[in-house]
């Protein structure tokens, strides 16, 4: 297969992709069959990468205070202002906030400038929000941030336990790998531990709907039970570990009684017994955990309580077993390697270790070295708000959407003396707060490396040049560093030169003291770098006996369970949980550009138990206000059956570019884990109330409409149209004139209208026989399926039958498509249900053979399975 071999820019699975330019100039994306992370598989997001390319919505030129400038002016301005702030207020008055979307080479240069030349550790990353608790747990247990599992272990495990991981949606390629292993070995078991009954649970042998925040009780209970039933591995414990006595004492004190553990965790005793028995009977166990564990005020303890169970049984460091933290971003691991967090040094060295600081400073030949931890993400933006940090440079991330208490983050940036934002996207919520905007290269234009969740380094290769003034992040940072007087240390001409330095750094003072040592790659040539195949560190292998505390042992960590700090009360009686959906990524700046990804779930929602919805007077499909002590959003009501009573879920992706009131980060409490600094995204007290709209509507238009006059709106993009959902509490006056203004019609187009006394109003605008726009308004949010109307935008001319049915909104001959289920092939729920009924289908494979749905990435298989078992 020809094309450019590169790496997917989404989750931490790190899938290899092949990008091929077609004769017409488009980019085809295929999975790389030779990449060991995915062997050709891609999820829906990866498959749609070709639709997210191009210059629409791109940040293309530098600007200062809204005025376009050239690169020299912008770089000189940033360097001079940073230097001035440092001279007048000290080095602690500046900060960098970076991202797991950066390549390792970008990350390395930013960390080097901040810690080794500016001389402060005030550099942190959005990876703080997703995996820093796992990092802290690894360091406490192993002495270094090592992940002692690889993807091959999932193929070999007899029991896979997923904790706080909706892998079917968030890591679908890995999940399909697990299902493939299960199909080959039917005796393999899958347990899912999650407060929600997510799509992942559709394939689980056991689902434990653990009460939010009680994971430490659960795994302390498992630890105590294993020890009590003689399932500890005494020889392993004696030879390779320390601290078992204290860890067991705490576990026995807090969770020795199985009935009490079941009660605290909200589980049936039978469920708990079954889980404990499965863990006992299967030696080859992989416990895979993700954001549901990490994003907690006790995230580090949760991770350590899991690791303790593997250490007790010796189920670590051998094939098919171990605790496995799966990262959320494509290069979260690479950022950890270069020390891109406020409490780290480069190459897994420790900031508090004087010898490590000396090693790094001597290698960099730097004038200063950070001598104490910098401010972690939440504290960093609080310091910006307080004015102690006077300059912040934000790279490749959108904290005004993604951080907790996000309105305060925006307020902090609006107060800040200097806000520099490097991004590839224009108009982000964070970019609107910037004094200086710097256009960065995007995926497809960047060259360097990333490291995935199993420690595998892969090349990301450019296959198209950066447009206009866009430049790589490493180049931007290096240019500013040179202008600050550090020219010799930042005279890089390519990502290759940075990688060689990074690799050489990893071997400094190692002598077996650190697992992260890729120094043999420091000798590769430029051609070898260009052709570098995926490689996993440590390059010499990892044995069960290799741990990196001074005593060369793994340490059990006593984990005392604690309830979340903010708990529900009479004013805020529900628990808000936030997270990802299947087909969107982070703050949607890339995925929202793909019509097929927007088709699955096109707007934000609050998912809650039907009993809670009934009690609160909420109808499915209506709008509701979700409020916490920190903010409020207005989103659509959903009762999926996934939620337990008392809990609600809202996705993280929506922001001010796509929804008027959808930034869920503004509602999340700013409490963090005291060890890792990771925020509590999974447990915020909340209430839900009807929004009380007096009218609802939707518009399908060829171009985005002016939504300034709408009280509530959300937008998504189709192949030939923009979909806008609308609502308001105030009645619309002069609806005809308002509709024409909203749709941008000047009155000379052909308009077809309908209205009645019940508040229903519909209008279609036609230009040269083509449908230009359509708007439906009603008192209730009950409208025909949008599928048929959307299909009309692909027609060059409307037929007379189309015109006749236009304001009805549906054709009697058309099968309702309903929401898209399979994004890869555009198969809707209506088509699947019709095929199931007509052909008496029994399995997802039957559906796949008939409609192709579920036969590509597989991330829609859980939904197909649910449709097969739904009452008909």
Image (cartoon, rainbow, N blue to C red):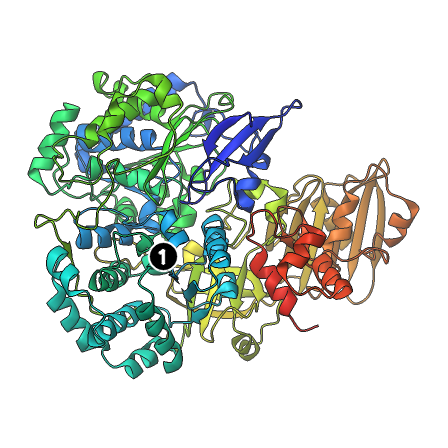
Residue 61 drawn at (x, y percent): 47, 24
Q: Residue at x 27, y 19 (%)?
A: 483
Residue at 22 percent of width and 16 percent of height? 488
Residue 49 lies in quadrant: top right
Element type at marker 1? strand
Q: Nearer the viewer, residue 96 or 646?
A: 646
Query: Is residue 619 shown above or below 303?
Result: below
For label 1, the residue is: 288
Q: Is residue 600 visible?
A: yes
Q: Is 78 on the left-hand or right-hand side of 188?
A: left
Quadrant of residue 355 within the rendered picture: top left
Point out the image quarter for the C terminus.
Answer: bottom right
The percent position of residue 540, horizontal first and vertical second, equals: 23, 37
Q: Is residue 794 above or below residue 198?
A: above
Nearer to us in this view, 697 or 499: 499
Q: Nearer the viewer, residue 530 or 317?
A: 317
Q: Which quadrant of the rendered structure holds the N terminus?
A: top right
- Give above or below for 830 relative to 569: above
- At label 1, counting other C-alpha atoms closer than 10 Å, the crowd grade (few under 14, some 14-19, many 20 or more) is many
Please say if 401 is above or below 484. Answer: below
Q: Position of residue 625 (x, y in %)?
A: 52, 65
**Residue 525 relative to residue 470: left or right:** left
* Residue 95, quarter of the rendered image: top left
- Residue 546 is situated, as x and y percent measured from the top left of the image, at 17, 47
- The residue positioned farthest toward the right in the image shown: 800
Residue at position x 48%, y 23% from top? Answer: 466
The answer to whether residue 231 is left or right of residue 828 is left
């Amino acid at each position: 297969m020809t094309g450019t071999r590169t790496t997917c820019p989404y989750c931490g699975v790190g899938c290899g992709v092949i990008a091929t330019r077609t004769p017409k100039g488009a980019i085809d994306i295929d999975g790389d069959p030779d990449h060991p992370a995915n062997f050709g598989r891609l999820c829906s997001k990866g498959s749609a990468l070709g639709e997210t390319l191009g210059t629409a919505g791109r940040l293309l030129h530098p600007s200062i205070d809204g005025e376009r400038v050239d690169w020299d002016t912008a770089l000189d301005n940033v360097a001079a202002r940073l230097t001035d702030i440092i001279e007048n207020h000290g080095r602690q008055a500046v900060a960098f906030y970076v991202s797991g979307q950066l390549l390792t080479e970008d990350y390395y240069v930013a960390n080097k400038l901040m810690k080794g030349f500016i001389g402060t550790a005030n550099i942190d990353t959005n990876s703080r929000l997703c995996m820093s608790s796992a990092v802290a747990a690894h360091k406490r247990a192993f002495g270094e941030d090592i992940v002692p599992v690889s993807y091959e272990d999932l193929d070999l495990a007899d029991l896979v336990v997923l904790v706080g991981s909706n892998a079917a949606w968030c890591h679908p390629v890995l999940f399909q790998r697990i299902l493939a292993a299960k199909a080959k070995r039917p005796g393999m078991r899958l347990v899912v531990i999650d407060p929600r009954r997510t799509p992942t649970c559709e394939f689980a042998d056991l689902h434990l709907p653990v009460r939010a925040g009680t994971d430490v009780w659960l795994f302390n209970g498992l630890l105590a039970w294993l020890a009590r039933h003689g399932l500890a591995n005494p020889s392993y414990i004696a030879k390779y570990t320390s601290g078992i006595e204290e860890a067991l004492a705490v576990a026995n004190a807090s969770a020795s009684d199985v009935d009490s553990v079941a009660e605290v965790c909200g589980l049936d005793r039978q469920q708990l017994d079954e889980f404990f028995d499965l863990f006992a009977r299967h030696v080859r166990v992989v416990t895979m955990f993700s954001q549901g564990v990490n994003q907690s005020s006790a995230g580090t303890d949760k991770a350590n309580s899991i690791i303790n169970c593997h250490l007790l049984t010796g189920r670590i460091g051998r094939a098919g077993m171990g605790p496995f933290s799966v990262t959320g971003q494509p290069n979260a691991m690479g950022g950890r390697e270069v020390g891109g967090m406020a409490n780290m040094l480069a190459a897994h060295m420790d900031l508090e270790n004087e010898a490590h600081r000396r090693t790094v400073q001597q290698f960099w030949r730097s004038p200063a070295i950070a001598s104490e931890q910098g401010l972690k993400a939440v504290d960093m933006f609080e310091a910006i708000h307080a004015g102690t940090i006077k300059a912040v440079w934000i790279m490749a991330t959108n904290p005004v959407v993604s951080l907790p208490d996000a309105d305060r983050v925006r307020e902090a940036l609006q107060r800040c003396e200097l806000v520099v934002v490097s991004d590839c996207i224009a108009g982000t919520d964070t970019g609107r707060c910037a004094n200086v905007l710097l256009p960065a290269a995007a995926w497809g234009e960047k060259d360097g490396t990333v490291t995935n969740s199993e420690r595998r380094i892969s090349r990301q290769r450019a296959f198209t040049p950066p447009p206009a003034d866009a430049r790589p992040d490493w180049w931007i940072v290096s240019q500013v560093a040179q202008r600050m007087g550090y020219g010799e240390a930042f005279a890089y001409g390519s990502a290759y030169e940075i990688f060689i330095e990074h690799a050489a750094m990893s071997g400094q003072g190692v002598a077996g003291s650190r697992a992260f040592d890729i120094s043999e790659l420091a000798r590769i040539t430029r051609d070898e770098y260009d052709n570098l195949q995926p490689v996993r560190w440590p390059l010499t292998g990892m044995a069960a006996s290799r741990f990196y505390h001074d005593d060369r042992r793994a340490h059990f960590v006593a984990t005392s369970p604690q309830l979340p700090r903010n708990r529900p009360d009479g004013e805020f009686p529900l628990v808000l949980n936030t997270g990802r959906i299947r087909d969107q990524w982070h703050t949607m700046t890339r995925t929202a550009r793909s019509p097929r990804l927007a088709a699955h779930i096109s707007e934000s929602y609050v998912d809650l138990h039907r009993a809670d919805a009934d009690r609160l007077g909420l109808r499915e499909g209506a709008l509701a206000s979700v409020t916490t002590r920190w903010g409020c959003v207005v989103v659509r009501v959903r009762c999926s059956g996934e939620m337990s009573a008392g809990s609600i879920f809202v996705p993280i992706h929506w922001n001010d570019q796509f929804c008027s009131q959808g930034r869920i980060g503004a509602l999340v409490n700013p409490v963090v884990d005291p060890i890792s600094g990771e925020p509590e995204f999974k447990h915020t007290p909340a209430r839900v109330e009807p929004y009380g709209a007096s009218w609802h509507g939707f518009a399908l238009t060829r171009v985005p409409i002016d939504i300034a006059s709408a009280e509530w709106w959300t937008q998504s993009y189709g192949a030939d149209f923009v979909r806008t959902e609308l609502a308001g509490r105030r009645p619309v006056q002069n609806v005809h004139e308002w509709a024409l203004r909203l749709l941008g019609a000047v009155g000379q187009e052909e308009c077809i209208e309908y209205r009645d006394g019940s508040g229903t109003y519909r209008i279609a605008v036609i230009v040269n026989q083509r449908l230009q726009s359509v708007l439906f308004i009603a008192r209730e949010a009950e409208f025909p399926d949008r599928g048929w109307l959307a299909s009309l935008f692909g027609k060059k001319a409307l037929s007379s039958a189309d015109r006749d049915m236009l304001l009805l909104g549906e054709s009697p001959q058309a099968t309702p498509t309903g929401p898209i289920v399979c994004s890869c092939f555009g198969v809707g729920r209506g088509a699947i249900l019709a095929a199931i009924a007509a052909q008496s289908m029994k399995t997802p494979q039957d559906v796949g053979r008939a409609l192709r749905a579920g036969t590509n990435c597989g991330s829609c298989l859980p939904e197909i399975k649910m449709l097969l078992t739904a009452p008909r």
